[in-house]
Amino acid sequence: MQPLLEVWNLSKQFGGLHAVRNVSFSVREGEVVSIIGPNGAGKTTVFNLISGFLQPTAGEVIFRGQVVSRLKPHQRARLGLGRTFQIVRPFSGLTILENVMVGAFLHTRSPAVAREEAMQILRFVGLEHRAHQFPGSLTLAGRKRLEVARALATRPRLILLDEVVAGLNPTEAEEMIRLLRRLSELGVSAVAGVEHVMRVVLRLSDRVVVLHHGEKIAEGPPEAVVRDPVVIAAYLGGEVTAGA
Amino acid sequence: MEFLAQLPQNLVSGLLLGGMYALIGAGLALVFGVMDIVNMAHGAFIMVGMYTTFVLCTRLRLDPYLGLLVTAPLLFGVGMLLHRLLIERVAHASHMNQILLTLGLSVALVNLVQLIFTANYQQIRTSYSDAVIRLGSITMNVPYVISFALATGITLGLYYWLMHSEFGRALRATAQDPMAAQLMGVNVRRVQSVAFGLGMALAGAAGALLTPVYYLYPTVGANFGLKSFTMVVLGGMGSVVGAALGGVTLALAESVGQMLVGHELKDAIGFVVFLLVLLFKPAGLFGGQRA
Amino acid sequence: MTRWREAAIPLALAAAVLAVPLVVKNPYHLNVAILVLVWTTLGAAWNIVGGYAGQLSLGHAAFFGIGAYSLALTAHYWGWSPWAGMAMAVAVSVPLAAAIGAITFRLRGPYFVLGTLALAEVLRLVVLAWRDLTYGAAGIMVPEIFPGLSRAPYYYFIALAAIAAVGTTWWMERSGFGYYLTAIREDQETAESIGVNAAWYKNLALMISAAFTALTGAFYASHLMFIEPDIVLSEPVSVQMAVVAIIGGRGTVLGPLVGALLLVLASEIFRAQFQQAHLLIYGLLLMLTILFMPGGVLGEIQHRLRLRAAPRPVIGTTFSSSHESSGQREVG
């Protein structure tokens, strides 16, 4: 079966700097794949290339069998490619419910339907009791949930989650991971960008891709990647024991 | 070839006007380019400089060029005051609110002047208003030459001062990173007030120098205001020298361009250039270095 | 049921607006009422782009002037009826909006504002210079849409236009389109990430806005019976449109009506003192609004009501905060 997302030899140069070089990986239907790498490893650039906010210098992005490398972000969203941002970006002048409704308008014109669906999604992410408040009243963890909810409202097939747990305390991170594991209930696959290798992340992921200085240095099931000497030498060191 | 025959005269006229444009551009570059405050009132400040000079000339019988010595310091003070009273309150707000506040200020100033001086065109006359210098087939009005010389002197002096003075260093530090500048012991608030005052003083100086060679009317600044953004954009943002060069370039483009499109569309040249530069060469013609 | 209840207040308001000439008979007062509605329509038109979509245009005089000149020139050269001229005004404004949008929406933040200002100025200068066609600064006579002494027909016409413009905003605020424009204003990139074709919706908003503006321009020309570039194409027209909406409340349905009432009445009251400098009030009120209630009169009221509804403090509000996208210094 064809993978949901295929990334072929993706490269991005800024001036002389190779932010991403020759990165390839794929995501199958229903999978959760984590991209691990410290700040500056190129995760956000990869997300921007896949979602269309950056144009690759070389390489292709294929989503649901279609080459999307030249499509604009909103066209990719329309095909079912959702994303969140590393720095949360709520529409702060809209209520939490309205934020999510904007996403739902991708597949309905009726405000009533959009409101109903947005409410369901808020229940799914556990923000239903905050629906009529403004995003400014949420904690960072809450805003990250809102980001996920807003993206889910577009009914994506795949969601790119940039830094899902960064800045969250262990309890909040655990809750976020639990939420992400339930994405399959909605039939959504996920690519999660993660800075630090926490146990929870490893438990979450079906597969892990490790980026280092913009290049992929390892890929595989979490347990294998953690033991990969290349990964340990390049990056992991003792950090993997940190837990959450 | 009539075009070629008139070209030298137009180039010289453009260059003379360019001296004043340089001053206008440098003033806005300090405020918009360096301090990142979108000042829609720059044109109105020029107009205020012109009317201040006009009053000094007609009431106190002061020579317009001596009036410069009053106009510029006066507007410097007013500028610092405006910064403390108004601009500072939106310095950290969105660009949109800066635009709207300074736009309101501009509209208020223009209409205040209109209320006091009426909308009529006015002009000052000096003993040398009609004097000309002839160089072959080229004629230069003496007031234009004096204004050009003074404007160029002020622009160069400003540049030297910014590059070599303690204030210049503080200003550049503040422009790059206000937080870091604060930590390094720069009085950021004061630097910003002074920069805004300086920007207004430069607009006032340009106004004073324009007074002997231009008509006055309350909306005279409108075109200069929008054009000053053209100059800053041409100069590649954030660069005082770039904006000054942008000013000279725009003046030359206007004086040569009006031979092609006619006098009435002369002002449109600056606006078209503005759009073209933003769309196709957003870094400006003279690179983007800060100075 | 709820639909009807929701529509009851707007319908009552519309009926009240239409009933004004039954009460107001004094021609001077009726003219002031016409002016209020002219600026309500213009403010509402501007509000679609400048308020809801957050694209602060200072070039709407271009659409107003094109509307006015469409009526004037088709009547003058082709002997068209002013009604046909008015249809022409709307028909011309939409492609003009598409062209202006194609240029200016590539610019961000302050450059968008300056770009719209520059384009409108270029248009004014061209109309001034093209004397063979437009009679330049000498101006041109415009036929009346309602010949006769009574101003009441003019009132009814502009009242219907104002109701249409404000009604469009009212409908918009309740539709996905309105949500999309607000999302674009709040954060264009995020909006794109959830499937909003920002470029298209901004252009659509501008086209709708331009159509109402041009219609009002044609109406105003016919009401005034004479136009010249400085009356219908100059920067103050653009500024007034924006100021009306901003003072009343950017991104609120009735903000333009409130702003128009405040500003037109204030101008009329101070007309004797300020004469031609009546825009002084616009400038001062704009400054005060930005400093003390950036959301405008209705924005401020709405904000307070929402504050009361929300149990926890609201941090981000639309126009008072500094969150506008960090990329606003980028160009293109």
Image (cartoon, coloured by chain):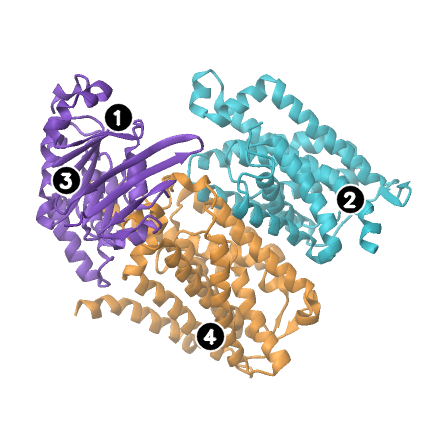
Chain colours: A purple, B cyan, C orange
- Residue A32: assigned label: 3
Q: Which residue is mark 1?
A: A38
Marks 2/1 in contact by CB < 8 Å: the verdict is no
Frontmost of labels 2 and 1 is: 1
- Inspect the image, locate mark 3, and give the three-letter code of the amino acid beneath it: Val
Marks 2/4 in contact by CB < 8 Å: the verdict is no
Q: Nearer the viewer, residue A105 or C21?
A: A105
Q: Quadrant of residue C49?
A: bottom left
Task: Tell me, yes or no, whether dots 1 and 3 are on the same chain.
Answer: yes
In the shown orientation, is residue C124 left or right of residue A6?
right
Please state the horizontal and vertical placement of residue B102, each as a whole percent of the image: 52, 43
Q: Which residue is mark 2?
A: B11
Q: Quadrant of residue C271?
A: bottom right
Please state the horizontal and vertical placement of residue A17, each as a whole percent of the image: 40, 30
Frontmost of labels 3 and 4 is: 3
In the shown orientation, is residue A10 left or right of residue B248?
left
Q: Which residue is mark 4?
A: C155
Element class at badge 3: strand
- Inspect the image, locate mark 4, and give the three-letter code of the amino acid beneath it: Tyr
Distance, label 2 to label 4, CA atoms, is 55 Å
Q: Residues within 10 Å of mark 1 (few under 14, many from 20)?
A: some
Q: Chain of mark 3?
A: A
Distance, label 3 to label 4, CA atoms, is 64 Å
Q: Nearer the viewer, residue C49 or A23?
A: A23
Q: Chain of mark 1?
A: A
Please state the horizontal and vertical placement of residue C64, each as a whole percent of the image: 53, 65
